[in-house]
Amino acid sequence: MMYVRISGRIRLNAHSLNAQGGGGTNYIEITKTKVTVRTENGWTVVEVPAITGNMLKHWHFVGFVDYFKTTPYGVNLTERALRYNGTRFGQGETTATKANGATVQLNDEATIIKELADADVHGFLAPKTGRRRVSLVKASFILPTEDFIKEVEGERLITAIKHNRVDVDEKGAIGSSKEGTAQMLFSREYATGLYGFSIVLDLGLVGIPQGLPVKFEENQPRPNIVIDPNERKARIESALKALIPMLSGYIGANLARSFPVFKVEELVAIASEGPIPALVHGFYEDYIEANRSIIKNARALGFNIEVFTYNVDLGEDIEATKVSSVEELVANLVKMVGGKE
């Protein structure tokens, strides 16, 4: 079993990872949202650049597919997963096509998650048959941290950069629009800042139906697992490895033109064989102290939690493994897979 909670901070410079608006125009806006921040004078509401949890989840899905399709069980993906389309079946669909062309009936959750690893890990909705599954991977918005917002009050976090697309003729010259060759100018917004994030992975539920009443085998302390143990391990490991590209900047839009200037500053991660509390989002100024209290009190309540930190000191009374990178964190988590069931 494997339940993982990760909270931390990243430094992003000149990124344009989520865009909104701009359809039919030559100006592309970055996604924005409003957050509440406590100041010396009380509360204030501030508009900030944001990266949605939906965007973060999509890129985890991409990483999961890339890793899982290289395993011996790679055919157990939907055909659309190979195009990185999430498992949302159409209104009238009662069957799905696998990566190998086989057909899967969508009238039973156990069958769907057994045959389709992407539906198992990232959830699915089949409206026609009334079957659904909540994603086992959940991601919050990535937001500028509240202490950063207060420190740079009045500074512009968003700037617009002018780009051009050039179409040249056979002689290499920029022609006119009448000739079918021209130069197109457009502007795109970019943002900079220290951002917080939070990710939840309920991988202990991989291969276990959730939507129907749970049936327990006789003398078996856990619900029925409907997939082969080795494939279950491969699904969990692929979901963990998908954190690596995602937390190295491989997320969002506009990657070819401006791969984000991305750096993980610090993080706290906890893992367990059973369900565990979520960590406080890295947005909050006191998130390290708050997470320290969560870990300490959860252990006092009997939660068996492994703790990992990067550039974070939780204090001498909190037993934790310090890691030097996201890759080392994932390597430690992968080692935990296949322990007690």
Image (tube, helix red, strand yellow):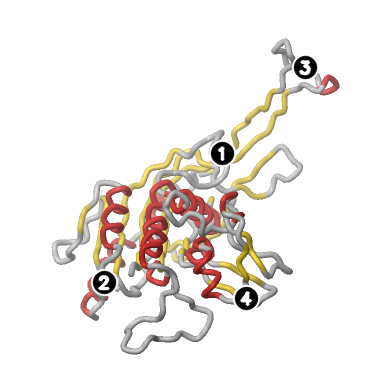
Q: Label 2 belongs to which residue?
A: 340
Q: Label 4 belongs to which residue?
A: 107
Q: Nearer the viewer, residue 277 or 78?
A: 78
| Residue drawn at x 59%, y 51% as measured from the top left | 31
Q: Which mark is nearer the camera, 4 or 1?
A: 4
Name the amino acid, label 1.
Answer: Thr
Residue 159's tag is: 1
First along the sequence among labels 3 and 1: 1
Q: Position of residue 6 (x, y in %)?
A: 36, 60
- Helix, strand or loop under label 3: loop
Q: Which mark is nearer the camera, 3 or 4?
A: 4
Q: Position of residue 333 (x, y in %)?
A: 29, 58
Circle 4 packing at 10 Å, graded few (<14), some (14-19), many (20+), is some
First along the sequence among labels 3 and 4: 4
Q: Are marks 2 and 3 in contact (CB under 8 Å)?
A: no
Q: Which mark is nearer the camera, 3 or 1?
A: 3
Whole-number angstrom distance, CA of label 2 to CA of label 1: 51 Å
Q: Nearer the viewer, residue 84 or 12?
A: 84
Whole-number angstrom distance, CA of label 2 to CA of label 3: 67 Å
Whole-number angstrom distance, CA of label 4 to CA of label 1: 50 Å
